[in-house]
Image (cartoon, helix red, strand yellow):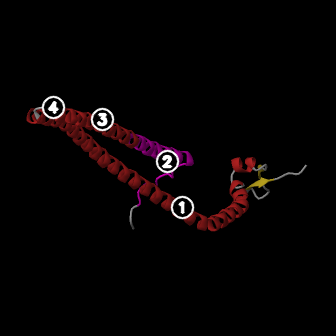
Amino acid sequence: MPAFGPATAALSDAELRETIDLHSGVLAKMSDKLDEQGSLQQQLIEVSIKGMDSILKLALAAKEQTDPARYARHIEQELDKTIGRILDRLDIMHSSFEADRCNAAYRLEDLVEQEENTLQRLRADQERAGRWKKRIPFIALFGLVLALGLAVALPRILADSGFGCGIIGGAWTRSTTEAEVCVFYSG
């Protein structure tokens, strides 16, 4: 016969609500973080566009000068500095986004697993409750038979001793045949 482990108590409605509230809070925080990172990326793009506009203005000013080769080298150096910094920042942000995406995916998998476990526990609890509902008529019948049996047998069992006789309202006396009996007097 297989050994059964201890039964786990079903989660109450309050515990289920608390679990769902915790899951909702985690998802809301993750959404806020992703929105914040999107805003930072938009700001970086705007900074990049402004930087490129200023570089373009410098290039136009250099074109107007008399020595285009000298200014071309200067512009090249400025472009390398400016675009290099922007590309470095974009690379760092991309790495950060990738790490956050992986972290969010891991947490989401964990939440899905927790939800599946909770649903499995609920299904198991419902199955156990259904089995007990099927047993209720038999338990009620057993209780009724037990109550009737005790109603008939208990007074006879109590009447066999002096103490029991006193509990059920009788008196313990000796009869004319010298046998001890429990007697009930009216009156």
The quadrant in which the N terminus is found is: bottom left
Asked whether 27 falls inside the magenta stretch, the response is: yes
Task: Evaluate if marks 3 and 2 touch, with contact meaning CB atoms under 8 Å apart.
Answer: no
Amino acid type assigned to the residue bearing label 4 in the image: Gln
How far across and down, in percent of the image, does residue 110 sit? 36, 51
Amino acid type assigned to the residue bearing label 2 in the image: Ile
Amino acid type assigned to the residue bearing label 1 in the image: Gln
**Label 1 secondary element:** helix
Above or below for 40 versus 115 = above
Task: Evaluate if marks 1 and 2 touch, with contact meaning CB atoms under 8 Å apart.
Answer: no
Upstream in sequence: badge 1 or badge 2:
2
Residue ID for mark 1: 126
Q: What's drawn in magenta, residue-wise?
A: 4-33
How far across and down, in percent of the image, does residue 59 sit? 20, 36
Distance from the alpha carbon under mark 4 to that under mark 3: 23 Å
The quadrant where residue 113 appears = bottom left
Amino acid type assigned to the residue bearing label 3 in the image: Lys
How far across and down, in percent of the image, does residue 58 sit? 21, 33
Asked whether 113 falls inside the magenta stretch, the response is: no
Residue ID for mark 2: 20
Q: How would you rate the neighbour count of disc 3 (Cα within 10 Å): few for under 14, some for 14-19, many for 20 or more?
A: few
